[in-house]
Image (cartoon, rainbow, N blue to C red):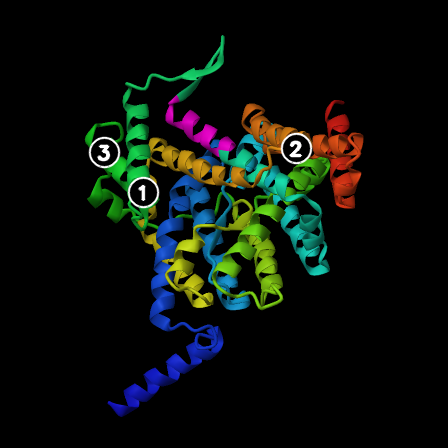
Amino acid sequence: MSAAGKSTSGKSSSLDRFFKLTERKTNTKTEILAGITTFLTMSYIIFVNPSILADAGIPKEAALAATIYGSVFCTLLMALWANFPVAVAPGMGLNAFFTYTVVLGAGLTWQTALGAVFISGMVFFLLTITGVRQKIVDGVPALLKSSISVGIGLFIAFIGLKNSGIVVSNKETFVSLGQITETGPLLALFGLLAASFLMAKKKKGALLISILLTTVVAMITGFIDYPHAAKDVASFSLPSLSDTFLAMDLKGAFAYGILSILFSFTIVELFDNLATLIGLSSKAGLADENGKIENLDRALQADAIGTMASAAMGGTVMNAYVENATGISEGGRTGLTALTAGILFFLTLLFAPLIAFVPSVATAPILILVGALMLSEIKAISFNDYTDVIPAFLTIILMPLTFSIAQGLAFGFISYTILKLTTGKHKELHWMMYLISIAFIINFIWGSH
């Protein structure tokens, strides 16, 4: 008995030393519970991301495998390399940019787009280790950072409304209300209300529960077929990466001339991921009295390496999720929280055959709600200065209307720089804004030929 107790104590001590549990005023139980909470709030990405990537032509099974394996790999890097209580998965917004702007919009193959993702990961890594990444973020005004989040939120919500059939195309008015009395839109509205109710009640895993509940109702109503349990169990196998592993076309990406695509990937990823990591780290109390965050550079490096690995597997840019705040609120302070979430992501491979039965009407409401949550950033936008309001408005409105995150970014940055220059407010411009705006203008000129 005493030997067993000693062994357990030894293990606990090793865990404590590795993750600095005592130093960060936490314990194993708290960290594990925090990791479970984080997983429950983030796990909707397992259902949503393959659906978005399938629209780009990526085989859904491979997209599912890439989503899970990529999330596990990058989350474990965050846990074991950076000791951050942060789980990572393919970024919402960046996956939409990959499919709807790069592949469907620009006409690239998904293999070429994966090549662009891999190259962007290399760029992220170089920008991180050289410190340029922080300088770029510091040079962009908070107004535009907030506008980008709001614009991406509207873009994602628009995709959710479109995928659910609630909003449809119309020759006369471009878009209009769909036939909402049909089964598909009704199921999506049911899922939207269910998720909203559960979120309002602060139910853990609200989005995941909504997806599962809507899927069950879809089966009951005959919208989708029931899975044949015996057959599915007999043919069970882990989802394969064979269709996408190392399928990225680096040569094609370079040949296409992917400056604007890489630039857009970089800009969105820079602001979204760094801002999220800093916010989560501060919430977890990992910043010292001078605001310095221990191992932030390692966390950013882990994100960049994870993006390269994700592209190699057939996935998109990786990102720290703001949903990690739920686990941190439960007391998560170390990489043990992320390790727990990573293990749970890995275990979802066992349920892969069932995930394939989830219809788009069950995942579309989640896109709408994620978009609604991103709208909160609008409170950081000043409406007292037209040189702020107009660039913010153009950034936000043009992302959904042009069906392109990149176009919204371009109009926002260029208009902000021009308005500040022409109204005598050039002192408000960081030199980085000139470079970014010029890059977007050059891209417009190239794109017109």
- Which SS type dominates the magenta stretch? helix
Q: Earlier in the sequence, mark 2 or mark 1?
A: 1
Residue 416 horizontal side relative to residue 239, left or right: right
Give the mark toward the camera: 2 or 1: 2
**Quick check: 43 above or below 255?**
below
Q: Earlier in the sequence, mark 2 or mark 3?
A: 3
* Residue placed furthest toward the top: 172
Q: Which residue is mark 3?
A: 217
Could one spot residue 383 in this view of the protein?
A: yes
Give, as a three-letter code, the residue at label 3: Val
**Quick check: 131 above or below 424?**
below
- The region drawn magenta spans 154-166
Kindly report the distance in space between the C-alpha atoms of the residues bearing marks 2 and 1. Answer: 35 Å
Within-10-Å neighbours for mark 1: few <14, some 14–19, many 20+: few
Q: Which residue is mark 2?
A: 385
Mark identifier at residue 200: 1
